[in-house]
Image (cartoon, grey):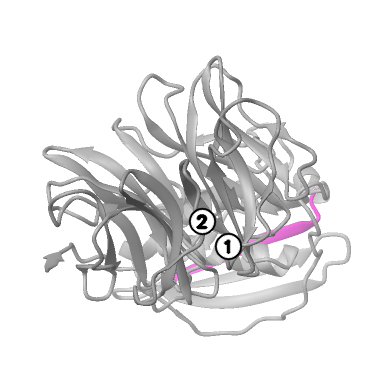
């Protein structure tokens, strides 16, 4: 059975027509390292001033939210020379409009020495302005901090629509929302493949209880992932793309299973009379974190990828669930039930340094990491309706991404290649 989805286009409508220097200005080692101060001059243009203003605005927003850079925004009373002197790097840009496209020349200059760090040219079309802005932003972050930004990433989430719950896609900043499914059924718990070319999710669209299905972005089709009988939920691809872990419920008992990326060679990892759920892979593919009630209440556990060496990670709080392993490998995000609802927490993989990021004044659920391990996306009802939010891994730079209500279950994409 195949269900047609909608066409989505992740193609970058520009070509890079120049290569700059590849030196890294300042390698960022951790989120605690000092942010690089940058000034962004007004972009010059031979014709379209609004295009230049819009491009600069999006780039400034991306850089500020990267977690690595701080942009000095000029005030009406600020002296431009003083602004530049306070910065480590000056970012400049020039737009040359052609008949149907435009060229953008990017420049990075070290303020203290006047040394040119990079120049690079891009060709784009006005309708692809946001794509260009995101790409330029990630390039800047890479050149200055040694790690690509997340502006070109996507987020898939569940949104309530007439007749069911559908999957939708948006840019990392909440813009350009596109519907993926239109089956008027219940679609839940999406998970990206490591190459960003497909999604796994739980769906009722095939009848009976939830089963796992695959959404292919190229073909825009949905196909069933595993044919065996049972209730399937919580899929997650291993980082190397070779395996998929998920929850299978048979005869009332939920355990964690694993299968090959094509749904073959189904194998059981846990075998316990209580619920085991929410598997999430370690970045090296060697371990899986999950939630289990085997201690009497839901707690977080880690096991080897083959199902052995199970050990308990959390001991504080009575209800801990929804674990997600950081791409950096050092921490696990999860939610814990407190008086105000579920709260978003982090813990080291050693079980040390438990920290809650949220305020206990609302509920925060379904965390998912950005591919750089520096941001989290999640669901919250902090404004009275369920919406998607994101923040840095320390809880700062909280940003609301959706506004229509009924939006839950986000999952952050890997870094997407230009041809995706």
Contact between marks 2 and 1 (CB within 8 A): the answer is yes
Residue 247 falls left or right of residue 88: left
* Residue at image location 22% in from the left, 75% down from the top: 219
Q: Is residue 89 magenta?
A: yes
Whether residue 326 can be seen here:
no
Q: Could you say which disc has been placed on residue 307 in the image?
A: 1
The residue identified by callout 2 is 270
Q: Is residue 393 placed above or below 93 in the rendered structure?
A: above
Mark 2 or 1, nearer chain start: 2
Q: Quadrant of residue 335?
A: top right
Residue lying furthest right in this view? 113
Q: Residue at x 12, y 37 (%)?
A: 162
Crowding near the residue tagged with mark 2, few <14, some 14–19, many ≥20 C-alpha atoms within 10 Å: some
Choose between 332 and 62: the one closer to the eye: 332
Q: Which residues are magenta?
A: 87-96
Disc number at residue 248? none
Question: Observer-nearest residue: 77 or 5?
Answer: 5
The vertical placement of 347 against 405, above or below, is below
Secondary structure character of the magenta stretch overall:
strand
Say if the magenta span includes residue 337: no
Residue drawn 50% across the image and 64% down it = 414
Question: Quick check: 373 left or right of 417?
Answer: right
């Amino acid at each position: 059975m195949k269900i047609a989805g909608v066409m989505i286009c992740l193609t970058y409508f520009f070509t890079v027509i120049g290569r700059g220097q590849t030196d890294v200005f300042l390698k960022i080692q951790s989120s605690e390292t000092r942010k690089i101060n940058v000034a962004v001059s007004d972009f010059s243009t031979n014709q379209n001033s609004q295009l230049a203003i819009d491009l600069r605005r999006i780039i400034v927003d991306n850089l500020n939210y990267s977690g690595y850079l701080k942009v000095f925004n000029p005030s009406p009373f600020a002296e431009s020379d003083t602004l530049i002197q306070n910065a480590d790097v000056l970012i400049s840009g020039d737009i040359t409009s052609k008949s149907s496209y435009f060229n953008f020349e990017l420049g990075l200059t070290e303020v203290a020495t006047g040394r040119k760090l990079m120049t690079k040219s891009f060709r784009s079309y006005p309708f692809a302005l946001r794509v260009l802005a995101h790409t330029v932003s990630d390039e800047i972050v890479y050149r200055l901090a040694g790690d690509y930004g997340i502006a070109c990433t996507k987020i898939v989430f569940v949104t309530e629509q007439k007749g069911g719950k559908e999957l939708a896609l948006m840019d990392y900043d909440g813009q350009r929302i596109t519907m993926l499914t239109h089956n008027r059924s219940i679609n839940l718990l999406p998970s990206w493949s490591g190459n960003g070319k497909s999604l796994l999710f739980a769906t009722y669209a095939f009848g009976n209880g939830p089963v796992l299905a695959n959404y292919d972005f190229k073909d825009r089709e949905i196909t069933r992932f595993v044919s065996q009988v049972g209730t399937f939920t919580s899929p997650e691809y291993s980082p190397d793309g070779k395996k998929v872990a998920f929850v299978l419920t048979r005869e009332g008992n939920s355990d964690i299973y694993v299968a090959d990326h094509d749904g073959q060679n189904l194998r059981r990892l846990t075998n316990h009379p209580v619920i085991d759920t929410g598997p999430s892979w370690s970045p090296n593919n060697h371990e899986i974190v999950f939630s289990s009630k085997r201690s009497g209440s839901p707690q977080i556990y880690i096991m080897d990828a083959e199902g052995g060496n199970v050990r308990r990670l959390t001991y504080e709080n009575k209800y801990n669930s929804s674990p997600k392993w950081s791409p950096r490998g050092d921490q696990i995000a999860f939610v814990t039930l407190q008086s105000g609802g579920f709260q978003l927490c982090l813990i080291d993989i050693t079980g040390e340094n438990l920290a809650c990021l949220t305020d206990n004044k609302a509920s925060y659920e379904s965390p998912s990491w950005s591919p750089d391990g520096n941001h989290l996306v999640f669901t919250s009802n902090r404004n009275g309706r369920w919406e998607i939010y994101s923040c840095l891994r320390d809880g700062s730079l909280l940003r609301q991404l959706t506004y229509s209500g009924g939006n839950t279950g986000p999952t952050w994409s890997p870094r997407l290649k230009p041809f995706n």
